[in-house]
Amino acid sequence: MPPYDESAWEHEYIEAGGLRFHMVTAGEGPVVLMLHGFPENWFAWRYQIDAVAKAGFKAVAVDMRGYGQTERPRKVSDY
């Protein structure tokens, strides 16, 4: 069993800048925005999501443009 618990996580989508973004959220309270580096996706934060949520915050781990389940721009210059 992995050292994280996905049962309380929610996969959500939002539209922004003409793209559909995927994010995973957990917890309630002030938002802690988790942005992955290159070449990762939201899953890079899997070990921190539960700890942030249990500390009284809302963890929001986003797939950046072109990564994971987030759409990619049509032109490289749009990154």
Image (cartoon, rainbow, N blue to C red):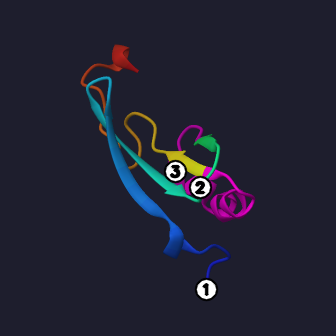
Q: Earlier in the sequence, mark 1 or mark 2?
A: 1
Residue hosting label 2: 28
The answer to whether 56 appears left or right of 39 in the picture is: right
Could you classify mark 1 by the number of other residues whose Cα lies within 10 Å: few (under 14), some (14-19), or many (20 or more)? few
From this view, report whether residue 30 is shown above or below residue 51.
above
Q: Which residue is drawn at 62% across and 79% down?
A: 2
Residue hosting label 1: 1
Please state which of the two labelled residues, at mark 3 or mark 2, is closer to the viewer.
2
Q: Residue type at mark 2: give it.
A: Glu
Q: Earlier in the sequence, mark 3 or mark 2?
A: 2
Could you classify mark 2 by the number of other residues whose Cα lies within 10 Å: few (under 14), some (14-19), or many (20 or more)? some
The answer to whether 79 appears left or right of 30 in the picture is: left
**In the rendered image, which quarter contains the N terminus?**
bottom right
Q: Residue 42 carries which label?
A: 3
Percent from the top left, x then y, of residue 23? 44, 49
Percent from the top left, x then y, of residue 78? 35, 17
Residue at mark 3 to residue at mark 2: CA–CA distance: 18 Å
Residue at mark 1 to residue at mark 3: CA–CA distance: 20 Å
Q: What element carries label 1?
A: loop
Q: Is residue 2 visible?
A: yes
**In the rendered image, which quarter contains the C terminus?**
top left
Q: Residue type at mark 3: give it.
A: Trp
- Quarter location, residue 34: top right
Furthest residue in direction bottom, as rendered: 1
- Quarter location, residue 50: bottom right
Percent from the top left, x then y, of residue 7? 50, 75
Q: Which of marks 1 and 3 is nearer the N terminus?
A: 1
Percent from the top left, x then y, of residue 37? 60, 38
Furthest residue in direction front, as rendered: 29
Could you classify mark 3 by the number of other residues whose Cα lies within 10 Å: few (under 14), some (14-19), or many (20 or more)? many
Residue at mark 1 to residue at mark 2: CA–CA distance: 25 Å
- Please give the range of residues in magenta: 35-58
